[in-house]
Image: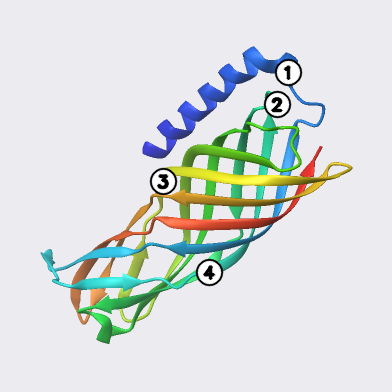
Amino acid sequence: MKTANSCFLLVVFTSGITGVAQADTPALPWFLHVGAAHIDTDEAAKVRVFDAPVPGADVRLAPRYTAAVDLGRFFTPHVAVSVSAGLPLKQPIDAAGSIQPYGRLGRITYGPAAATLQWHPLPNAAVQPYVGAGVSYMHVFASRDATVHDFHVSDDVGPVVQGGFEVPLGHGLGLFADVKKGWLHANATGSLAGAPVDARIRLDPLIVHTGLAIRF
């Protein structure tokens, strides 16, 4: 329900912009950002066994790289909406803190995505900065056991902020750099040494995306 409400509000707001700004749409309103993305999480976890908190228990997620695309459209020279997604990537989840001796707890295969509304203050400059905000989404395609059996990690949706810039090179091509900060949490469940275990994992990813910008 949280995902549906957030997406509905973004669609409604975008529709309002479209209705009042069609006359100002740029000649090349669409843009595509294609490149590599580095994902680094600011993780922390609250772990419970038999529904009792485990003091000092934590998890660690190593940074990952993936290919990502960002498709967007300008409604005025200053206002655009974009949707971004990365190729699914495999992410080990390792024990840390007081449960570090348990090693690798499990693995997930997930895909990151975001939808943002952007403000471009200098659309005709040699370097064109922008900022944005919207919703981020993490979809878990698969969860795999390691030390934890029957390992399962949930999807989540949360807010995201964005900042970046484009450097036009001519003929609709350019270079870009983009940074997104999301706030996401996931619920993990399973059994550890025969005991039921669950964790609330803070992810809060920082995604740095760079590559080729295409206007069309």
Instruction: Name the N-terminal-most of marks 3 and 4.
Output: 4
Q: Secondary structure at mark 2?
A: loop
- Identity of the amino acid at label 3? Val
Residue ID for mark 4: 64
- Identity of the amino acid at label 1? Asp
Instruction: Name the N-terminal-most of marks 2 and 3.
Output: 2
- Quarter of the image containing the C terminus? top right
- Quarter of the image containing the N terminus? top left
Q: Residue at x 19, y 70 (%)?
A: 196
Q: Is residue 212 left or right of residue 84?
A: right
Instruction: Name the N-terminal-most of marks 1 and 4.
Output: 1
Residue ID for mark 1: 24
Find residue 3 and report its image quarter. top left
In the rendering, at what x and y percent does residue 73 appear? 69, 33
Nearer to us: label 2 or label 4: 2
Residue ID for mark 3: 157
Marks 1/2 in contact by CB < 8 Å: the verdict is: yes
Q: Secondary structure at mark 3?
A: strand
Marks 1/3 in contact by CB < 8 Å: the verdict is: no
Instruction: Name the N-terminal-most of marks 1 and 2.
Output: 1
Q: Residue at x 51, y 62 (%)?
A: 39
Instruction: Name the N-terminal-most of marks 1 and 3.
Output: 1
Nearer to us: label 1 or label 3: 1
**Does 31 appear above or below 95?**
above
Instruction: Judge whether residue 202 can be spotted in this image.
Output: yes
**Does 215 appear above or below 74?**
below
**Does 141 appear above or below 77?**
below
Residue ID for mark 2: 77
- Identity of the amino acid at label 2? Pro
